[in-house]
Image (cartoon, rainbow, N blue to C red):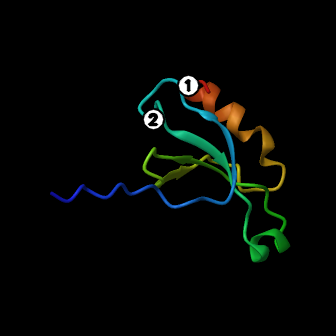
Amino acid sequence: MIAAAHHSPPPMDGWLLGVLRNGPYAGHLVMGRQPSHRARAGGSGNPVTVVSPSGEVIMLVPGSDSAGGEGSLVKWLKEKGWAL
């Protein structure tokens, strides 16, 4: 009998900001991502994404990819009533 292979999600460039504790994405990761070199040249911030446990990027936190977008995660979580 051959054992089923375990497939891990691919590694992601970025850093973990937290795990959503409630809402429809509870258990999903919230990650800061390093923008591409081309995006940095345009003055963008560090985009924040919601990532599923399987490694799929679900969404970009609105406003996090713009210059000065550091407060967008806190604002977005508050608007949704969600917490890390």
Dividing the image into 4 quarters, which one contains the C terminus?
A: top right
Q: Give the residue pinned by disc 1.
A: 82
Marks 1 & 2, CB-CB < 8 Å contact: yes
- Pick out the residue farthest to the bottom: 38
In percent of width and height, residue 74 lies at: 71, 31
Q: Give the residue pinned by disc 2.
A: 25
Q: Give whichever of discs 1 and 2 has the lower sequence position.
A: 2
Q: For the residue labelled by badge 2, is the local secondary structure a helix, a strand or a loop?
A: loop
Horizontal relation, residue 6 to residue 82: left or right: left
In percent of width and height, residue 71 lies at: 78, 38
Q: Identify which residue is drawn at 15% across, 57% down.
A: 1
Q: Identify which residue is drawn at 66% across, 60% down.
A: 13
Q: Identify which residue is drawn at 35% across, 54% down.
A: 6
Q: Amino acid at mark 2?
A: Tyr
Identify the mark at residue 12; answer none if there is no mark: none
Q: Along the line of sight, which residue is nearer the eye, 20 or 79?
A: 20
Q: Is residue 35 above or below residue 71?
A: below
